[in-house]
Image (cartoon, grey):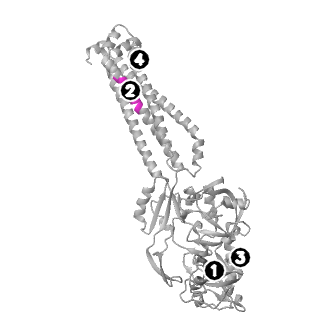
């Protein structure tokens, strides 16, 4: 009967060949669409886990205020500009309907930990510390409205090599400073400032020679309450502060100014032995880690559970661990004694504020805890963005582990900046977030998103997904149409043949087999060939597009993970292709058999004479 069926197929070469070609095409489209759809979803899931979307927040200045300060070298006022803000906005303003945060916005402060028992970059290189507290004496009566030479009689803090030597001194930012008298000694807190200038310097120095000058700084401390309001210093309004060098007389160090100088010696000694500590709710919220400038080289990251519970665990820098012979599992003692709510630790400039309270007292430790090292991080030289760099010896801890957050010894306070305020949202939700922000937000904040190109990648993958879904639907419709149409040509149009075979005594079973075998041969051949072609092409498409790394992993451990899992991924992809090819081919064949058997049974249930009397 199979031979008879094949003869019937050969009698319709055009129809048979058309069915075979179209079935190959339909099976090809169906298989290709199915495999691409499955692999595309797997790729989206993989990148969903690999990518992180971070937003940084910066408050924009409401206006720019012009200010002036005296410049002793120019003998005139210099103009400077200072940003003015309508008010300092809290991070809570970013909590609005539709803000689907993974980690909510939080303005990070950094804390100073007094660490005299550890080797830090400041303590290992004391000559790099910019502050000198000393007793000086002029070599002649003079007015320091330009660089004048003074003798350093005693170094109370700072570079001890200066003691006994001379230096150039200038009250650079005061128009009419008070005079210095020969033979008198003066207590000063000095900072280096540009180059020496004026007739005294020019008379003594060679034209090509340049020397730095030292300027005195005021002893008025700037301290803030937890709401950002500046606290008043007891020295404010003191006329002596315009010329902050103080004649040393009997009992000087018993006076308010003298005690403040002594407390500054202790305060700067603490500051030189200070280790920066940053509390956060996730390591990736620190842009240095997100951008790949910093990475965990030993141990592990702080877990989400540890962050949420405020466990006393930490990440320390490689240099700090090596200098102090610390390893994973060791404890670090943190003694927090000041808070900086203006800038990040990597951009700190400690000499801009005095390490004493507004009462002139030494800052006291307000929180002491021991943290266990769970990870050691390293930082590449040449950061992508200097704003986000980490400080030397910086310690990263869970924010919830700090009990006295933003409440004690706040020495600087400022608006939200990209380096201090960040949040995390689900990947691919930037447009939705910004649409809601347009409704409820304010123009005073600038939000910048970093997603490592996920939005563009997701759009490309979604396009592939739509194409694969289209191929899948078109292939399925073609298969169904071909099975219905050609089953009509090969079966329904052969009623006369079936009636004659039945009249000659051929059993229904044999007739069914005769009709089914021919179409089944074409169906199986076409589906196998089409499914195999679809599987092969899908592998090429997958290799060319979906396995690309769509973001820079130069400074990431993602490369190692990808390399390690490459062979497993190839094996998994091949297994998926084989399963889809087999399942699609079997499904097409089964569908064809069911449709054909149903039509054959309907014909076989009719009497032969009735079949002969019907027109095709």
Q: Which mark is residue 517?
A: 4
Residue 162 at x, y percent in the picture: 69, 78
Label 1–label 3 contact, CB within 8 A? no
337 relative position to 529: left or right = right
Label 4–label 3 contact, CB within 8 A? no
Secondary structure found at label 4: helix
Question: Disc 1 and disc 2: Cα gap in Å?
Answer: 89 Å
Which residue is drawn at the image coordinates 58% and 80% (left, top)? 196
419 relative position to 275: left or right = left
Residue 113 at x, y percent in the picture: 67, 69
Task: Work out whether 347 lies above or below 572.
Answer: below
Q: Quadrant of the N terminus?
A: top left
Q: Nearer the viewer, mark 4 or mark 1?
A: 1
Callout 3 crowding tier (Cα within 10 Å): few <14, some 14–19, many ≥20: few
Q: Nearer the viewer, mark 1 or mark 3?
A: 3
Question: Disc 2 and disc 3: Cα gap in Å?
Answer: 92 Å
Question: Disc 4 and disc 3: Cα gap in Å?
Answer: 104 Å
| Residue 399 seen by the camera | no
Which residue is drawn at the image coordinates 68% and 56% (left, top)? 374
State the extent of the magenta-drawn residues as a range.
Answer: 18-29
Q: Tell which circle, 4 or 3, labels the residue nearer the N-terminal end.
A: 3
Q: Tell which circle, 4 or 1, labels the residue nearer the N-terminal end.
A: 1
Q: In the rendered structure, does residue 27 fall within the stretch colored magenta?
A: yes
């Amino acid at each position: 009967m199979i031979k008879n069926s094949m003869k019937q197929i050969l009698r319709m070469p055009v129809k048979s060949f058309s069915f075979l070609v179209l079935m190959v095409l339909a099976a090809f489209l169906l298989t290709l669409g199915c495999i691409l759809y499955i692999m595309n979803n797997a790729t989206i899931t993989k990148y969903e886990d690999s990518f992180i979307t971070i937003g940084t927040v910066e408050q924009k200045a409401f206006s720019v205020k012009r200010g002036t300060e005296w410049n002793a070298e120019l003998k005139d006022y210099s103009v400077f500009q200072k940003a003015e803000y309508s008010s300092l906005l809290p991070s809570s303003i970013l909590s609005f309907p539709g803000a689907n945060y993974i980690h909510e916005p939080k303005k990070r402060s950094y804390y100073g930990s007094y660490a005299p028992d550890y080797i830090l970059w400041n303590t290992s290189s004391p000559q790099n510390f910019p502050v000198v507290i000393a007793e000086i004496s002029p070599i002649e009566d003079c007015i320091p409205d330009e660089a004048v030479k003074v003798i350093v009689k005693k170094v109370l803090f700072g570079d001890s090599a200066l003691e006994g030597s001379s230096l150039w001194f200038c009250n650079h930012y005061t128009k009419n400073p008070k005079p210095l008298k020969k033979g008198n000694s003066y207590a000063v807190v000095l900072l280096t400032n540009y180059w020496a200038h004026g007739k005294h310097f020019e008379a003594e120095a060679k034209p090509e020679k340049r020397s730095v000058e030292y300027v005195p700084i005021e002893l008025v401390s700037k301290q803030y309450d937890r709401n950002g309001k500046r606290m008043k210093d007891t020295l404010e309004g003191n006329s002596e502060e315009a010329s902050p060098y103080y004649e040393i007389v009997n009992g000087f160090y018993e006076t308010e100014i003298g005690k403040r100088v002594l407390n500054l010696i202790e305060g700067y000694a603490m500051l030189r032995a200070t280790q920066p500590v940053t509390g956060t709710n996730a390591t990736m919220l620190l842009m240095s880690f997100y951008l790949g400038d910093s990475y965990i080289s030993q141990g592990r990251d702080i877990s989400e559970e540890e962050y949420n519970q405020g466990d006393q665990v930490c990440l320390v820098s490689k240099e700090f661990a090596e200098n102090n012979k610390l390893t994973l599992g060791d404890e670090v003692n943190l003694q927090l004694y000041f808070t900086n709510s203006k800038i990040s630790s990597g951009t700190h400039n400690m000499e801009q504020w005095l390490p004493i309270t507004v009462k002139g007292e030494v800052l006291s430790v307000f929180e002491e805890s021991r943290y266990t090292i769970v990870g050691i991080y390293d930082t590449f030289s040449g950061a992508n963005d200097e704003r986000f760099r980490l400080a030397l010896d910086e310690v990263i801890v869970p924010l919830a582990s700090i009990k006295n957050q933003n409440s004690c010894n706040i020495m600087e306070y400022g608006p939200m900046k990209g380096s201090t305020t960040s949040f995390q949202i689900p990947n691919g939700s930037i447009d939705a977030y910004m649409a809601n922000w347009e409704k409820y937000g304010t123009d005073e904040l600038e939000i910048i998103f970093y997603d490592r190109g996920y939005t563009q990648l997701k759009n490309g993958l979604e396009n592939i997904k739509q194409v694969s879904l289209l191929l899948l639907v078109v292939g399925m419709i073609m298969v169904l149409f071909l099975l219905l149409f050609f089953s009509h040509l090969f079966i329904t149009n052969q009623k006369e043949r079936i009636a004659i075979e039945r009249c000659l005594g051929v059993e229904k079973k044999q007739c069914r087999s005769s009709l089914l075998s021919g179409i089944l041969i074409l169906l199986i051949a076409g589906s196998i060939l089409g499914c195999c072609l679809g599987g092969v092409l899908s592998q090429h498409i997958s290799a060319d597009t979906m396995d690309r790394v769509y973001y820079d992993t130069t400074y990431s451990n993602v490369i190692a993970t990808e390399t390690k899992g490459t062979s497993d991924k190839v094996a998994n992809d091949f297994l998926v292709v084989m399963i889809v090819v087999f399942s699609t081919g079997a499904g097409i064949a089964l569908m064809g058999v069911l449709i054909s058997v149903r039509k054959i049974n309907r014909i076989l249930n009719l009497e032969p004479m009735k079949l002969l009397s019907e027109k095709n």
